[in-house]
Image: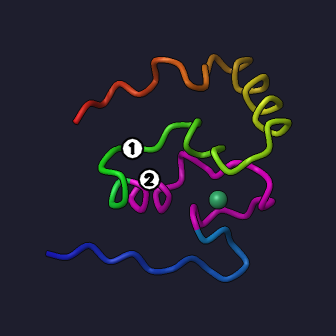
């Protein structure tokens, strides 16, 4: 069985199928983003991956905000191996 990914609606981000600013991180909780990323990289995406395309300023802002929710970007959240 071949997994098919239908492209997101044109107004949505084509990476994660979420309505966000191009300068903002992708949505790592997006099913589309996870499946697409997994097909390309063989692992689940992390917040670090989701904001890899962002400016350092945006990364810093998100890293700070996420830390308030207990999410440490680039930390030990990449528990899945192989
Ligand atoms: Zn996105």
Dominant SS of magenta comes to: loop
Q: Position of residue 43 (x, y in %)?
A: 33, 44
| Mark 1 lies on residue | 44
Residue at (85, 36) in percent of width and height? 57
**Membership of 71 in magenta stretch:** no
Q: In which quadrant of the rendered view does residue 58 lie?
A: top right
Of the four image quadrants, the one with ligand 1 is bottom right
Q: Position of residue 23 (x, y in %)?
A: 80, 55
Q: Is residue 42 above or below residue 64?
A: below
Q: Is residue 24 above or below residue 14?
A: above
Q: Residue furthest left?
A: 1
Image marks 1 and 2: residues in contact by CB distance under 8 Å: yes
Instruction: Give residue 34's mark.
Output: 2
Q: Position of residue 22 (x, y in %)?
A: 77, 61
The CA distance from mark 1 to mark 2 is 6 Å
Q: Is residue 40 above or below residue 82?
A: below
């Amino acid at each position: 069985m071949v997994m098919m990914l239908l492209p997101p609606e044109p107004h949505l981000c084509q990476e994660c199928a979420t309505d966000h600013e191009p300068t903002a991180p992708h949505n790592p909780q997006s099913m589309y983003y996870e499946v697409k990323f997994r097909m390309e990289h063989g692992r689940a995406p992390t917040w670090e991956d989701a904001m890899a395309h962002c400016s350092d300023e945006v990364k810093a802002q998100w890293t700070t905000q996420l830390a308030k929710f207990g999410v440490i970007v680039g930390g030990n959240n990449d528990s899945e191996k192989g």
